[in-house]
Structure formats: C-alpha cells, structure tokens
Image: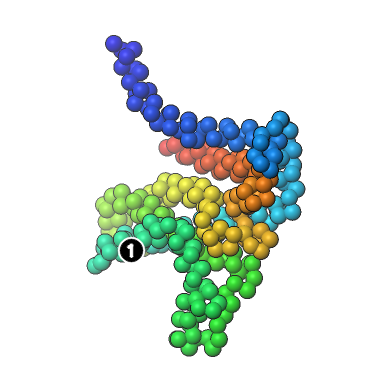
Amino acid sequence: MKQKQSWKPYLWLLPSILLISVFVIFPIVIVFRLSFSEISKSGVVGGFVGLKNYVEAVHLPAFGIVMKNTFWWVISVVGLSTLIGFIIALALNQKFRGRKIARSILIFPWATSLVIQASVWNYIIKYEYGSLNNTLLNLGVIREAINWRASYQIEFIWECACGIFVTIPFVAFCVLAGMQSIDESLYESATVDGAGFFSKLFRITLPLVMPSLTVSTVLNIIYVFNSFPIIFTMTKGAPANKTDTMITFLYMLSFYDRKKGPANALSVIGFLILCFCAGIYMLTMLRKEEDL
C-alpha cells in the first residue's frame, strides 16, 4: 500500500514530463545533433563533421556585430525596463483614485502582439507620414520632418525603445505582486520610528521584493534574448545584419542563406549562454537560502 502511494506523485507528473520531453528536451537533442552534422542547402542531413559548423559560424563576417548587438539589446531592454517597471510598480502600489484603471491600461502593451507593436512603432517614426513628425510639426517644435532612421545605429535604438516599452508591464506586475505581499505593519512601524520614503524603500521594499525582481529579471533575459518579432518586423536586420541579434541572424542564416549547419551551431551557442545565465541565478538563490 505504501509503495502504491509513493508512485502517485510521479503518475500525476507524468503528463507534464511527457510534454516537456516531446516539446523541449527532444528538440534540444535534435539541434545538438544537427550542429555536429553536415547539412545540405536542401536540408539533407549528412555525417558527423565535428566542430566544423561552430568554426564556420564564429568566422562569419557578421558574427561579431551580431553578438555585440545581442549584448546591448539584452542589457538595454532588460536594464531599463526593470528600472522603469520598478518605478511604475511603486506608483501603482500607492492608493489613489483610478488605480485599477491605471493597472488595466499598463497591461495593454504586454498583451498586444509584438508584431503589431513593432508595426505601430514603424509607423510612428516614418519620415514622410509618421505620427511623431506630424505631431512635432503641428506643435511647432520642428520646422521640417526629421529622418528618424538616418543610420542603422538610430534604427537599433528605436528597436530597443520598442522592446523596453513592451517589457515594462511584465516587470511592473511581477514587482507589484511582490510589493503587495509585504505586511503593511512593517511600514507603519517604520513611520513611527521616523523613517522617510527612501529609508522605507531601501530597507523594507527593495529587500523584500528582491526575489520577485530576480525572477522577473532572469525570465526577462531569456525572453528578450529570444525575442524575434520586434527586430524582424522593424528592420529584418538591415542594413547588412547591422541591426540583427543572434535570433534573427540565425533565422536569416538558415532560411534565407540556407546555411543550416552554422545556424544550428548558433542555436546551441545561444542555448549555452542562457544556461549560463540561469546557472548563475540558481547558484545565487541557493546561496541566499543557505544564508537564511
């Protein structure tokens, strides 16, 4: 009887394990295998080629700039969305009239399709009939239309701005959930002791929402690193891969240039980078639990 009881939790977990195996583990294994195989332009898989695909991927002319773009894309989007999202969460945690409406409005950018968001941002910065130029002209701020896409550096900044805009709600709601779990008596006691806003922020709020903030940051890094629609919709990596990140670059490499071997190698490199970030997070959390 005890033996049957011990198997019950595993039986309940079995459907989830099967789904994860089919849709996560199995594709990862396939990609790893393909990254070490010769693949023709038509997709026919050949024999084992060792590290040939990895060497070819690293020596691609655009590899350096793509990696640099990916780094700045993740740092800027995750960093600024975390900062702004935290400030917005602080504001939404206060009691004021219309708070429920403000929270509902905040979720719209996150709930809307990324392709639609990127298309809207494309329309905003259009030179001829973009809403940004029209608004500034009507207000008399500028006398003639500005080319907001004058260089690939500026275009990349606009991509980052779009990424930050759509990511802020996720961070804000994660942090807000952590803030609402804080006991109000802690703030009341701090107020009685004469603590000000910043003293409460750094000694009560920030330490207690740190778990929520850490989880949202790690998930954000994974989501932003793998983000495809914004960059592909706004620029498709043009000109000459100057605005590409690793995800859009390997897509173009596989389906446009037909270099499927190096594309699979890049997929594995990206996977290992994310595993490294997740590993750091896990080690940090384990150390914190041991300290407690």
In-front residue for pair 117/81: 117
Q: List x then y, in percent, for residue 188.
A: 27, 56
In-front residue for pair 263/97: 263
Left or right? Give the position of 12 relative to 65. Answer: left
Q: List x then y, in percent, for residue 206.
A: 41, 53
Whether 262 is drawn above or below 103: the answer is above
Colour scheme in use? rainbow
Q: List x then y, in percent, for residue 33.
A: 63, 32
Quarter of the image with the C terminus in it: top left
Q: List x then y, in percent, for residue 113.
A: 42, 57
Provide the residue designation for mark 1: 105
Quarter of the image with the N terminus in it: top left
Residue sitting farthest toward the front: 42
Left or right? Give the position of 257 relative to 134. Answer: right
**Which secondary structure lies at badge 1?**
helix
Q: Is residue 196 visible?
A: no
Residue sitting farthest toward the top: 1
In-front residue for pair 72/292: 72
Q: Is residue 46 visible?
A: yes
Three-letter code for the amino acid on which mark 1 is drawn: Ile
Query: Residue at position x 40%, y 58% from top?
Result: 112
Query: Residue at position x 47%, y 81% from top?
Result: 134
Whether 265 is drawn above or below 194: the answer is above
Residue sitting farthest toward the left: 97
Pointer 1 local density, CA inside 10 Å: few below 14, some 14–19, many at least 20: few
Query: Residue at position x 33%, y 20% from top?
Result: 8
Circle count? 1
Whether 70 is drawn above or below 23: the answer is below
Query: Residue at position x 48%, y 65% from top?
Result: 119
